[in-house]
Amino acid sequence: MDPSDIKTTVVTAGDRAYAWGAYLLVASMRMNGMQHPAAVGAMGWTDKMKQRIAALGNVTVIDIPPSRQCVACQKPMMMMSDAVKTDWVCWADADGMFVGDCSEWLVGDDVEEIVVRKCTPPPPQLTPECLETWRRDVEKHYGRAREKSRYDTTVNNPFIVIHRKWFPFLERWQHQIDCVLPKDLRFTWQKNSPYFQSDESVLGSLVCFAPDAPKVVDNYKANGSVDRNRYYAHFAYYPKPWQMWNRHTMRWHDEVAAVVDWILEQKQVVNSDLPFSLRRGWWPFNRRIARFAPWVWRAIKLKRMIF
């Protein structure tokens, strides 16, 4: 790729549990010829892990101070970091990776739009009561709000592309997060909250009710709807591939394996550096237990909480 064609910085972040996810994400970019600058927020990472991801090239590692809130609550702030020098910025969640050369999807078709996926169908949590809370909070903290939602749904934001002219909107998104989400929010899913998807729901409230929000793109391309060979794969459910495989993530087993093979061939890591679930010798075992992984993972997390 000609450096002059690069107009976007890819931004991601994670705590220590997501360090390998962020590493696989940036490695998938480099393996597929995507030489875009990457800015990686690291909360509680080891020096070794920060060195590994920096060794992939053109990566700025940004230390994030420890917080009681999950890293997702700092998403807009990360997208506006000084490391972003380009006209466009792309946020990609650390629990995902690029399949194929997705450079084309990292720039929007229109600077007036935000590239983010609309939820189809709308999630069941998007009740009239939820929407009224969103409208009221936007009016209170944003200053003014539309009487009726701009859309009949909300958005899903593991992958976002936006022009830097909308940095003031990102600032307002961060301000809204700070106002309406708990300061000790550890998990992105909040079952009984109008902000049931934390930062994602806050963004949804703004694109629905903020009068001067960017328009949500109608043709979202990063999910493979345009080209099945080029897309951003999001590992939405627990556990994640670097922790343990499950039935959802097994569909991308071969794609993840290709990235692992590439980083081994590039001498970025050796096999013993990898988490067990990414080591080739463990793959047959991981395949066999994938259907039980959610229950096993819950048991592991419960044990950690108790002991």
Image (cartoon, helix red, strand yellow):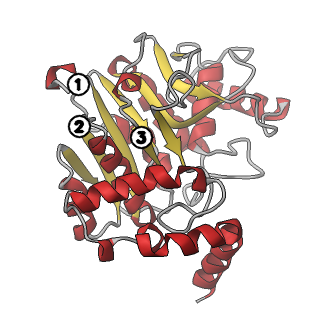
Q: Nearer the viewer, mark 1 or mark 3?
A: 3
Numbered disc 3: secondary structure = strand
Residues at marks 2 and 1 touching, judged by CB atoms closer than 8 Å: yes
Residue hosting label 2: 37
Residues at marks 1 and 3 touching, judged by CB atoms closer than 8 Å: no
Q: Residues within 10 Å of mark 3 (few under 14, many from 20)?
A: many
Residue hosting label 1: 6
Residue 289 position, x and y percent, is 65, 72
Q: Quadrant of the C terminus?
A: bottom right
Q: CA distance from mark 3 to mark 2?
A: 15 Å
User: Disc 2 marks which amino acid?
Assistant: Pro
User: Disc 1 marks which amino acid?
Assistant: Ile
In the displayed structure, 24 sits above or below 84; it is below
Residues at marks 3 and 2 touching, judged by CB atoms closer than 8 Å: no
Residue hosting label 3: 98
Residue at 21% of width from left, 46% of height from top? 59
* Foreground pick, 12 / 75: 12
Q: CA distance from mark 1 to mark 3?
A: 16 Å
